Structure formats: C-alpha cells, structure tokens
Image (spheres, coloured by chain):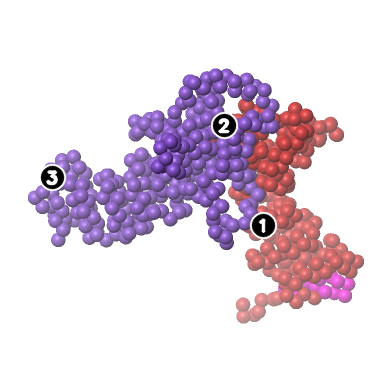
Amino acid sequence: MNCKLRRLDLLRNGQKSDCELHVSQPDKLKEGKRCPCIFRCHQVMLISASAEFERLIRDPEFQKNKRVISVDDASPTAYEALLLYIYTYEVCNAVTIDMCGDLMLLAERYEMLDFIDCYIDKLAHQEWPMEVVLQVFHLASEHHHPALMDLVAKKILPVATQVLMDNSFLKLSVKELKALMIILKKDGDLSDHELLTSLKNYQDVNNLRYEDMEQFQQLVEVTQLFGHVLFEVDGTIVVPEEEKPSPEE
Amino acid sequence: MSDSEKEAAGKAHLGSNNRWSDLEEEEEGEANDQGGIQNLRPELVVPRTTAASDVEENLPLGSPSDGSKRATSRNRRLEYFRSGADADCQVHVLSNCPQSDEPAVSVCYKKFGCHRIFLATASDKLEQDVYQNKDWNGVLQINGVSPESVEIFLEFIYTFEVTSPLVQLKLVGDMFILSCAYNMPELLRSFAEKLKEQELPLDGIFPAFDLAFRHNIIDVERVCIEKIIEEGASLIHEPSLMKLPVYALNYAIQHWLVADAVPPDELITILKQYQEINEITFANTQKFPHFTKIIKYFPNVLLDAEGFINQN
C-alpha cells in the first residue's frame, strides 16, 4: 500500500516530528550506563493509537522535558515494532520469537491487543526452534493469551517427543504442565505410557512429594487426565508396564 | 479511461479562494509558535459525531457488536477521528439541507475535524493540498461526492481499513472518484472487500457492475459478478439489466452460461427483450455486430428480416 509506505517514511525520517520517544536499555559493555534510542514521532499518531501515550503526552512533565517521552520497560527493538504498528498497522517481518515477552508487555501496557494479534499471525508463519516452543508456551500461559496458546498448541505437536526431552520442560510450573499434557493427550500422537513416563520424570527432578502437599495435589490433578493412576507409598507415580501386543496381533 | 479519470479528479476538488490569503499569513505565524497538541487554537469547533457513529449507536440491544469493544489501537484511532479531538483542520463536503423548502438556506456542508499529518501521509495530492497549498485556510473542500463516501474515505485514511457501517453498493461511483482523485487504489480494494461481506440490493448490482466494467475496477467487478452468478434467477428480472451496454451484457451472459446459473431458453428470452428495448436490429449497424457475438452462444437461433431473434 502506497499509504502505508508514506506513513513509514514519516516515521523513518521524522519529518514534521513534534515529540520524541527515548527508549533506555542497559549497555552491556558499560554496565549501569544507559544509551537511549531516540525515535522522532508525531503526537497525534501516538495519542490516536493508545490511551497510555495520551496520558504520557498530556502530562505536564512532557512539556517540561521538551516533549520527550522516556521509557525503559522494553527493548528499543520492541518499541520500534510497536511504533511501526502504530504508524502502519504492520508487523515487520524481522520481528522474532525472542521479542515475544517484550511485545506482549507493550501490547498490554498500551492497550493495543490488535498489535499482538498481528504479531501472532507473523509467528504462525515462522519456523520455531524447538527450545522456543516451551518458552512461548510459558509466556502464553503467563499472559492468559488464548490465541497465542492455540498457536503454541499447533507448534508443539510436530515436536511433541522432543519437547518432553527438553530440559525446559522440567522447569514448567505444575499448572503449565497440566495445560501441556492436555494439549499432548488431545493430539494422541504420544501414548499415555510416554506421557506418564515424562510426568514421573518431572516429579523426580522437581521432587514433588509430600513435603509440598499443595504442589503434590496439583500434580495428582494432572495424573487424573490418565484415568486410574497409582502411587507408591512415598507418593511416586507408578507408570504401568506397557501392554505387550497380544499374540493375535 | 484517462479522460474520465481527469474529469473525476477535476470534479473532486476545488482550491481555496485567494481572499483567505491574509488569514493564511496569520496562521503561518501561529504555526511557528505551536509547541504541540496543547497549544492548538482553542477556537476550533469540535464537530458533531459522524454519521457512522450515529448508525452504530442505534444498533439494537443484543446485537453482536453490543458491549465494549476490544482495546485495539484501530478502534481507538477511529473514535479519535470521529470525536475530532485535537483537530487542526477540517474537511467539508456539500450536503443536503435538512429543510430544503427554506429559501434562506442555500448551501450546507458536512464537516469533519481532521489532522493534517494523517491527510498528508495518505497521498501526494493530499500532502500538496494541506501542506504546500499557499492558499490553505484550514479547510479542505471536497465536491462532487457524497458525505458518506468522504467519511468512509477519511476513516480509511486513519485506519487503512474500510469498516464503516455506511458502506453500500450505491456509493461505488463516489468511491471510484475519490480513489482516482487522490490516487488511492487501496481504498477501492478495501471498499470492494467490505461489499463482499454484505447483502447487496439486487437493483444496485447491474449499475455497479456497469460502472466497474467501464472503468476496469477489477475488485468491484469481481464482487458484482459473484452476485450476478449467485443471484442469477432473480437478477434476470431486474430492469437495470436492460440498460447494460452490450459488452457488459455479454460478460454477464457468459458467466450465467458457464455457471449454468440461468437456463439457456431464459437467456434467449432476455436477449429478445434487450434487443427490443434497445432497438438493436440490422439497421443499428454499430451495435448489432457486437450483439451477434452473444447470440452465437446459442445454436439454432434464427433472426427475422429486421434482425430480431425468432424464438421457437
């Protein structure tokens, strides 16, 4: 769209700019020092897109600070993506999964849920490294984002076996573990035996037994997805022996 | 095609009068002092809500759109435009006066509070009009099109979407004019997509198809042809079918044949009616040869001495 290119030019060259957005981020080379990334913006663009930006711009401090908005809650790259969306309603193809946390934070702060929807559409067309699947699963769970969770479910299924082998699986909360098990069991690619084995492994690594009854109770809830599961006296999940194929088969 | 486009462009915009040049100089002075939103001239009148928001407000309770909208930046920007907040210019469109019998009232305008930065980034022409026009007086006047079409046009400029409940098939001519005048083909494309979601009035389909066909508005043409195929059984009775040019009629008939949407016998009956109403006989040396291209789709059709179809 020619219209979108023209607005992109406006953002890029800062023509007719009447305010600035300064995004601070700790410089890794000089610990503690901050190097602000400066974006030259237009007040009506920001105000018309977000109530939070309106609040920041209407604040008397804004004029005192020579029409500069200073933020430090997300990376400059994330803010650039946000501004790009504010100006063009597009998410740049270069936006990666690594930015998911920052972008969700910004979408919530600035009440721009369509921004995250657009980002999720982009993610859906990307290849996800296996280790990222659980990372995004964690974010979707943390932010209670159904659309992102649906996307995670689609991305998890092709790599289901690998997911259960990955160390990050063992670091999920029990609540997240339950959501993951629901996804994997629903798909049906992995047998109950495989799922229960990974569940037992999770229990062993995280030492979930009677010392933390609350966590243990939650774990028991997860096992109820698999019908009648038995526990040893010390609380360890008993994985039934895999059924041998009958002679007829 | 280019002549009609120039005509459309000419009709769509009038420049400001020179008598505003003094005010222009004064405004330039003010502009230099402006430090931001809060310094905007307080005398700017905030316009009343747009027709689209009126329509939305009247939606009955329980409708799907009832309840609070999602917190999206697009919705917010749309409301920002409709409210006219922080407006630094206005767009005026000629409008029908509510009391047309009063002789004192001669001209009425629909006024939209706008923001120059949004208008300027929509197209080169708009940038020239609002930033480089030496006669600029804070008002962009658009003539020759309806207020509804301008509202849709402006909402598209703000959100890059056509979502207005004002969208209807009869506006296609105005949308075409605006799209050409300001070189914004995306506007027509979005408008066509919106039309696709709607129930189109049967009496409006052929006139819109004719317009789209003549000006090569592919998106609208496609929407119309889908409806023509889909609603063939009903559309064959539409009077406007008889007013189509031969070329457009040819196109419609072809689609009905290929899609088996209308029985061939009924199509021949339509051709007879069209021929009689438009007096396409041997004597009409210009149109008749083109008309025969359609007749040839139907084997065994014979003509009488005057050239009229002789339907057995």
Badge 2 or badge 3: first in the primary sequence:
2
Give the mark toward the camera: 1 or 3. Answer: 3
Q: Which residues are magenta?
A: A231-242
* Left or right of residue B283: residue B155: right
Q: Position of residue B215 (x, y in %)?
A: 36, 39
Q: CA distance from mark 1 to mark 3?
A: 69 Å
The tag on residue B282 is: 3
User: Which residue position holds label 2?
Assistant: B89
* Side of A73 relative to B43 (left or right): right
Image quadrant in which the C terminus of chain B is located: bottom left
Q: Colour of chain B?
A: purple
Q: Is residue A127 visible?
A: no
Image quadrant holding the N terminus of chain B, namely top left
Colour red belongs to chain: A
**Splitting the image into 4 quarters, where does residue B82 fall?**
top right
Q: Is residue B122 visible?
A: yes
Q: Secondary structure at mark 3?
A: loop
Which residue in the protein does label 1 denote?
A146
Q: Main secondary structure of the magenta part?
A: loop
Type of amino acid under label 3: Phe
On whether disc 1 and disc 2 are found on a single subunit, the reply is no
